[in-house]
Image (cartoon, rainbow, N blue to C red):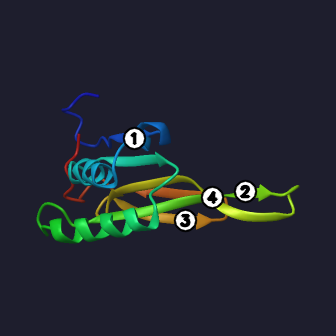
Amino acid sequence: MDSSDTNALKMDFVSSEALKESSSMEKISMIVDKVKEGDLLVIEGGLTPTEEAELIETTMREIDVENFVGIDIYTLEKDKSSFFGLSKKKAIGITIIGPANVMKTVKKRENFLSMIANLGDSGASLH
């Protein structure tokens, strides 16, 4: 991508395999670093509840009103059938994590997630 394109949004797609060998702190550090740069992450699967809590806690410590206002996390779940399809439980399909000042509009319904990135006056680092 041309770095002179000021209206571009960088999206990184990360497979569950890529994160499998990473420790919780390595995952959180990578996510915070990417989001602070203004990137949007789409992660296959998601974080554990403990990792998500630690991510939020880490983000709160890093907030700088002028440069980094925080993150938004959205998870799209999918139904997972078990025992001849009789009972269903939710499994995480993908997780989207990005700068709070970029991820503006989200519509979430079962099996559907829609997001609009607001790049114009967000103050986020753009690529």
Quickly name the residue at label 4. 91
Distance of mark 3 from mark 2, alpha carbons? 22 Å
Residue beneath disc 1 = 21
Q: Residue at x 35, y 49 (%)?
A: 40
Whether tag 1 and tag 2 are in contact, CB under 8 A, the answer is no
Q: Marks 1 and 2, how far apart in space? A: 24 Å
Mark 3: few/some/many CA within 10 Å (<14, 14-19, 20+): few
Give the quadrant of the N terminus. Answer: top left
Label 3 vs 4, first from the N-terminus: 4
In front of the other: label 3 or label 4? 4
Q: Position of residue 77 (x, y in %)?
A: 61, 59
- Whole-Å distance between the Cαs marked 2 and 4? 6 Å
Q: Are marks 3 and 2 in contact (CB under 8 Å)?
A: no
What percent of the width, then of the height, locates residue 63? 17, 68
Chain-order first, disc 4 or disc 1? 1
* Label 4 packing within 10 angstroms: few (<14), some (14-19), many (20+): some
Q: Which residue is mark 2?
A: 80
Residue lying at the far top of the rendered structure: 2
> Which of labels 1 and 3 is toward the front?
1
Q: Amino acid at mark 2?
A: Lys
Dot 3 or dot 2: first in sequence order is 2
Circle 3 SS class: strand
Question: Residue at (41%, 42%) from the top-left corner?
Answer: 19
Looking at the image, is mark 4 or mark 1 nearer the viewer? 1
Which circle marks residue 107 in the picture? 3
In the rendered structure, which amino acid carries the disc numbered 1?
Answer: Glu
Asked if marks 1 and 3 touch (Cβ < 8 Å), the reply is: no
Answer above or below: position of 74 versus 19: below
First-in-chain label (2 vs 4): 2
